[in-house]
Amino acid sequence: MTKSTVAWLVLLASAVLEAVWATALGLSEAFTQPLPTAIFAVTATLSLLGLGYAVRTVPLGTGYAVWVGIGAALTVIWAMATGDESFSVFKLLFIAGIVACAGGLKSLPEDR
């Protein structure tokens, strides 16, 4: 596995962790609930460490855009799936656009 492939896999894992910490942040009720607060702290730390590792290889702007885009998309999908946010076909369409844009950034030739 190439260094670039590993960096992209770490970046995607970090984006998933971003969705976990964002969800835990909402459940922590301003850090008053111990378990969601602990989940937030651990996953936020791991997510940022992974992002930091990935941008040593992936260009910073691209890596950050993919990290936040995929993390945000997963957060909204989870919120809709659990009923915390209303479902909308338009939301799914726009989320698909975010994911497509992240995939497009990945498909560009590396300029490093």
Image (cartoon, rainbow, N blue to C red):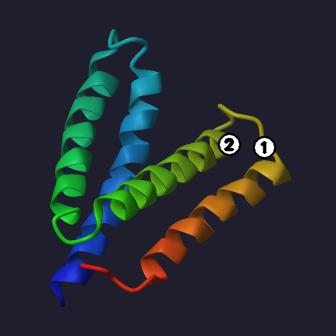
| Mark 2, other Cα within 10 Å: few <14 / some 14–19 / many ≥20 | some
Position above or below: 61 against 34 = below
Q: Amino acid at mark 1?
A: Phe
Which mark identifies residue 69? none
Residue 31 rendering spot, x and y as whole percentages: 33, 13
How many numbered markers are drawn? 2
**Callout 2 secondary element:** helix
Which part of the image, by quadrant, shows the C terminus?
A: bottom left
Q: CA distance from mark 1 to mark 2?
A: 5 Å
Q: Residue most toward the front?
A: 111
Q: Earlier in the sequence, mark 1 or mark 2?
A: 2
Residue 75 rendering spot, x and y as whole percentages: 53, 44
Place residue 96 in its image quadrant.
Answer: bottom right
Contact between labelled residues 2 and 1, with CB atoms less than 8 Å apart: yes
| Residue in the foreground of this view, choosing between 84 and 13 | 13
**Callout 1 secondary element:** loop
Place residue 58 in its image quadrant.
Answer: bottom left
Q: Residue most toward the right?
A: 89
Q: Going 18% across and 54% down the picture, which residue do you hit?
A: 52
Q: Amino acid at mark 2?
A: Met
Q: Going 69% across and 34% down the picture, which residue do you hit?
A: 85
Q: Which residue is mark 2?
A: 80
| Mark 1, other Cα within 10 Å: few <14 / some 14–19 / many ≥20 | some
Q: Going 30% across and 73% down the picture, which residue do you hit?
A: 8
Which part of the image, by quadrant, shows the N terminus?
A: bottom left
| Residue in the foreground of this view, choosing between 39 and 89 | 89
Q: Is residue 66 left or right of residue 31?
A: right
Q: Is residue 82 left or right of residue 70?
A: right
Q: Going 29% across and 59% down the picture, which residue do you hit?
A: 60
Position above or below: 99 against 72 = below
Q: Which residue is mark 1?
A: 87
| Residue in the foreground of this view, choosing between 64 and 73 | 64
